[in-house]
Amino acid sequence: MSDGRWIDLIDPAGNVLLNQSPSQAAQAVRDGDINGIAGINGQFAICQQAEDKLRFARTIARPMRYYQASARGKNCLIVAERIDEIYCQLAKLGMAGQFVPSATRMVPAHHLVEVDLPLHEATGGDVPVAAPRMERFLVPPQERWPADISLIGSRYVGRLLAACQAWLEGLDPKQPIGVLFSGGVDSGSVLIVLAHLLKEAGEDIGRLTPFTLAVDDSGEDVAQARQFLQQTGIDLDLEVMQVPLSDVDYRDAIGVIEDYKPLDVQSATMALAMCRAIRAKYPEWQYLIDGDGGDENLKDYPLEDHQSLSMQDVLGNRLLYQEGWGIDALKHSQTYSGGQSRGHVRTWAPARRYGFQGFSPYALPTVIEAAEQIPFVELTEWNPELLYSLKGKVVAAGVREWTGVEMPRFEKRRFQRGAVAASTFDSLFPANAQTYRDTFATRFSTEALAKTVCP
């Protein structure tokens, strides 16, 4: 879409809308209707023109960024999912010479963002980046529920189940579904819920395939995943995607996710290897589902991994893990946004690179809204250990209530750690965060971008 002043490279087919049509969702964004946007259930990135303004809205699971350029006497604002897509469009327009990747702007998740369109004709000199106006469309009430684990689990997993049911209803029933599966709480609960829904609908649960990654035939996730299936009685064959060490390269992941945060790069490195292996074996496979977002919702990250954070920070700041410190904070990155709004690219980009349509139900606003109503302070009394154990208790209680399945719980382990032997991990990933930044800077330098092969 374009009126000469802007170009929209966002493919509407990449949105997963669960309760309304694409035209209805687009109309809500075009009208700047906050309540209407809040009512869109799904994962989406939508940009619409309203006279001389552009309006953007997105959820965590799909990125959207924009860039304003000026060359040859013309102005143009480009909207896309990726930095390299913006560069390639600028190259087509003969405007790539002035491109600065850090000057692209990520639309923060859960906000309606409005910018003024540039004039058709450039006025000379640098064109200032359009100053955005932002209004939040996800405003979840906090700590509203009673401190009853059974009740909390039922309500929280109920939202997960409703999201998965709506998603299933929109799929071709003949298409298989891949579950990115480690046997952990998040991917495990997604698998149990999907199997339950298919059984309730009288469908064959064999439509589901749990995929688990093993690098060099190692890692603890495979044994954990098999134990999970055995203990839950889910009659599915685990498909282990065996990947040689030579196929795992963090530098490739940096290029795919266009970011340098070490933990996100590490996770994306494994996701990229997994998606590549699935695509090689199943050229026609379309749908993947994952449990990404479950940790953020239940605030289940060790504080020692974020030494600048305290329990007061984690429990006292709305949506800290989902959105970072917020759009008004000094720490907020205009290039990337913050929290999972930035980090979910670790899951989205590898799936997109290999042509999958991914779905992350825990990252939906409806599920996040439920999580925010959990009384974390009352349940944890500011004790980190009680916080770390909370997710397993809540999700297991909800799974039991809705499906009757007793879900096993294992020691928490990150995806990138479970897919490879501990002795090998350090040989795959640099210990120094600066190495990731340097690799990113090299990959996205002016010289490197000039060598980009554009479609």
Image (cartoon, rainbow, N blue to C red):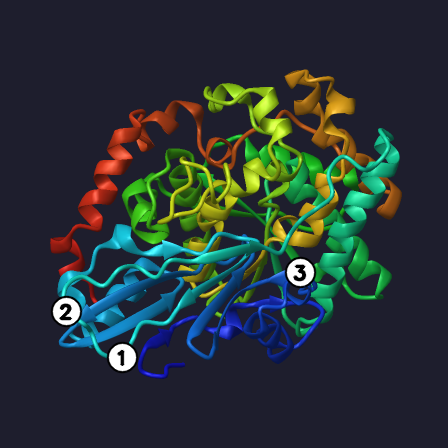
* Residue at image point 18% right, 72% down: 123
SS class of the residue under badge 3? Answer: helix
Considering every residue shown, the one lying at the far bottom of the view is 3
- For the residue pair 365 and 230, the one nearer the viewer reads as 365
Q: Residues within 10 Å of mark 2 (few under 14, many from 20)?
A: few
Residue 88 as seen in the image, left or right of residue 113: left
Rendered location of residue 292, percent (x, y):
58, 45
Report if residue 196 is visible in the image.
Answer: yes
Binning the other alpha carbons within 10 Å of mark 1 as few (below 14), some (14 to 19) or many (20 upward) gives some
Q: Amino acid at mark 1?
A: His
Q: Position of residue 164 (x, y in %)?
A: 72, 58
Helix, strand or loop under label 1:
loop
What distance separates the C-alpha of mark 1 from that of mark 3? 33 Å
Q: Which percent across, then down, holds residue 360?
A: 60, 53
Choose the circle earlier in sequence order: 3 or 2: 3
Vertical order, 392 against 345 (above or below): above
The structure residue drawn at horizontal position 31% and vertical position 65%, both measured from the top left corner, is 85
Q: Report how far apart the C-alphas of labels 3 and 2 lie in the structure.
A: 40 Å
Q: Residues within 10 Å of mark 3 (few under 14, many from 20)?
A: some
Confirm whether residue 451 shows in the render. Answer: no
Residue under numbered circle 3: 38
Q: Are marks 2 and 1 in contact (CB under 8 Å)?
A: no
* Left or right of 194, for residue 343: left
Nearest-to-viewer mark from 1 and 3: 1
| Residue drawn 40% across the image and 36% down it | 330
The one of 189 and 60 positioned closer to us in this rendering: 60
Q: Secondary structure at mark 2?
A: loop
Q: Is residue 323 above or below residue 352?
A: above
Question: Residue at label 2?
Answer: 124
Please tell me the numbered disc located at residue 120. 1
Q: Amino acid at mark 2?
A: Gly
